[in-house]
Image (cartoon, grey):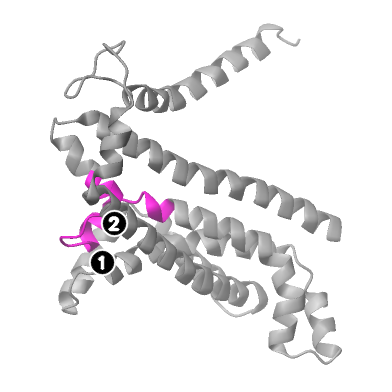
Amino acid sequence: MRSEGSPLLLKIAALACVAFLHVPLLLIFLYAFTTEEKSFQFPPPGYTTKWFGVVWERQDIWDAIGLSVKVAGIATVLALILGTCAAAAISRAKFFGRDHISLLFILPIALPGIVTGIALRSTFGIMDIPFSTWTIVLGHTTFCMVVVYNNVLARFRRTSGSMIEASMDLGADGFQTFRYVVLPQIASALLAGGMLAFALSFDEVIVTTFTAGQQSTLPIWMLNELIRPRQRPITNVVAIFVIAVTFIPILAAYYLTREGEHTAGAGK
């Protein structure tokens, strides 16, 4: 016997989960406009837009944003190159232990960030590598590469190998085959993986803490500001910026991945 109440209960549960996830984000937007500097009152005693002007004039915030964008951009490029090469090797080559190696590629994103951070910090210390922008980039590439690898590998597995073989039989070299056959097939997966990698890198804080030294990316700047009870609305304004920078690539990657799946399915 079907229960008429189940669908309604499921809808209520789904709405409750959505509210649990997103109401705190709405509070960030609300308190970015509050007139109160050091405490959170609900409802806020008043509203103002002055904090956006304060953020605009803070050079330390712009420096942190610049470093975060730089690190995320470089890490994304490296992740695209390394992740694509790894996915191509795993999907096209057959050798003993292939599944185990694929698991090793995925493992960094499954580990807690603090474990990865401690491991990287120990490695840099043993090798006497000074902390710099490049140590942050290397740390971020470890998990950004996994995102690209997963996206591209899934696309390779849905792409017919006969197309590559036909291209080579018709006289195309490796570069021409990649440019005219492989790249159009995996382009949306590359773009989606790159956007996800950029979003993950931009707001990463744990690994960055262990690899940044004295440098301050935007998430580290926010963490330091939260410890100090001064002008908290400034932190909320910056948080809005972080939400926008990470949400847009993730949303675009979601639709690109869906479009790629439909395209691959049509090709079959």
Q: Range of the magenta residues?
A: 200-221
Q: Check if residue 204 falls in the magenta segment.
A: yes
**Disc 1 + disc 2, Cβ < 8 Å:** yes
The three-letter amino acid code for the residue at tag 2 is Val
- Element assignment for label 1: helix
Residue 156 in view in this figure: no
Label annotation for residue 207: 2
* Residue closest to the eye, 70 or 2: 70
Residue 87 point in image, percent of width and height? 58, 70
Label annotation for residue 120: 1
Label annotation for residue 244: none
Q: Which residue is pictured at 48% across the width and 57% down the height?
A: 197
Q: In which quarter of the image is residue 141?
A: bottom left
Q: Which residue is pictured at 17% across the width and 62% down the height?
A: 213
Q: Which residue is pictured at 33% across the width and 57% down the height?
A: 66
Residue 246 point in image, percent of width and height? 46, 45
The three-letter amino acid code for the residue at tag 1 is Leu
Is residue 198 positioned above or below 57 on the image? below
Residue 119 point in image, percent of width and height? 25, 64
Q: Check if residue 179 falls in the magenta segment.
A: no
Residue 170 in view in this figure: yes
Q: Distance between the residues labelled 1 and 2?
A: 8 Å
